[in-house]
Image (cartoon, rainbow, N blue to C red):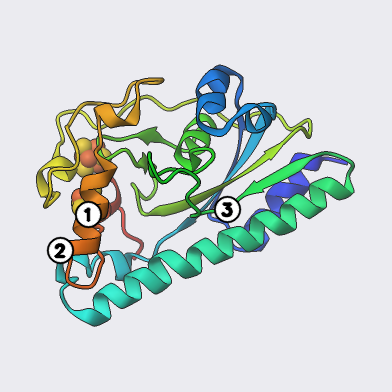
Amino acid sequence: MDLTKNIREMALDKGADFFGVADLSSARRFIEEQGGVEVASYPMAISLGIRIMDSIVDQLPHREERSVSVNYRHHGYEIINQRLDLLSSQISSYIQSKSYMALPIPASERYDDERICSVISHKLTAHLAGHGWIGKSCMLITPEAGPRVRWTTILTNAPLPATGTSAPQNCGECSECVDICPVSAFTGVPFKEYEPREVRYDARKCEKYLLDEAKWGVCGLCVYICPHGRNKKIG
Ligand code: SF4
Ligand code: SF4
């Protein structure tokens, strides 16, 4: 039985656009600081991604129109996150049926209100699985779709071989996400492993903008503008 092949097929059949396996050993201390000893005890992570529709992201410059914001929040965020959660639940049950541990992490639930983050960073696991690099926007940038992907993670002790290694930074001289942010939430400092996120991104500025200023509580301009997604549309 090829466990990895079966899980990959299950993921792709059920709608994932990205499947990978990350070896977490190089980031263990960082993961423990964020999520605790139990979370950091898992050696591997399955990283799953679903691509957001370009037709929705491309409308974001018009997000002051209510229909644009509603559709981004619904189909660009909530529904894709629900699809990811369903997928990771099904795969976790399958792994458990093979007598291994699997801990699905919700795609969008926040565990730490102070730092505004989850129990583990889905972007970090996607990065370690070889899906792309962490850009100046602090998002995972894929060569295939830029940041136009939502991610989730399943922690596991199943003996799955890692699918890739961390991709090198490829933002170069670009700073489009830094320049377009209406509240200057990004500092423009390139990602360095194990440097705190606060060096690059002030999540409170973004959250405050969405709560108090964005007309319909939606922005996403940093997702829209990245040339690695904008210039790689399907069709
Ligand atoms: S969503 Fe908007 S406000 Fe928040 S970081 Fe991105 S560009 Fe800035
Ligand atoms: S917009 Fe430019 S700087 Fe920002 S993440 Fe994309 S490539 Fe990097």
- Dot 3 or dot 1, earlier in sequence: 3
The quarter holding residue 37 reads top right
The percent position of residue 6, horizontal first and vertical second, equals 77, 48
Residue 234 versus residue 76: which sits nearer the camera?
A: 76
Q: Between label 3 and label 1, give the one nearer the viewer.
A: 1
Residue at numbered disc 3: 106
- Is the residue indicated by label 3 positioned so its CB lies within 8 Å of ligand 1? no
- Which element type, helix, strand or loop, lies under badge 1? helix
The amino acid type, in three-letter code, at marker 2 is: Glu
**Could you tell me which quadrant the C terminus lies in?**
bottom left
Chain-order first, disc 2 or disc 3: 3
> Where residue 172 sits in the image (x, y, percent)?
20, 28
Q: Quadrant of residue 188?
A: top left
The three-letter amino acid code for the residue at tag 1 is Lys
Question: Tag 2 or tag 1, which sits nearer the N-term?
Answer: 1
In the image, taking residue 188 as reference, residue 116 lies left or right, namely right
Answer yes or no: do the residues labelled 1 and 2 have beta carbons within 8 Å?
yes
Some atom of ligand 1 lies within 8 Å of the CB belonging to the residue at label 2? no
User: Where is residue 23, by image quadrant?
Assistant: top right
Residue type for callout 3 = Pro
- Asked if the residues shown at circle 2 and circle 3 are in contact, with their CB atoms under 8 angstroms apart, the answer is no
Mark 2 lies on residue: 213
The residue where tag 1 is placed is 208
- Residue 190, placed above or below residue 63: above
Q: Quadrant of the N terminus?
A: top right
Asked if residue 127 lies left or right of residue 176, the reply is right
Q: Nearer the viewer, residue 61 or 207?
A: 207
Mark 2: secondary structure: helix
What is the distance, in whole Å, between disc 3 and disc 1 at their CAs?
A: 23 Å
Q: Secondary structure at mark 3?
A: loop
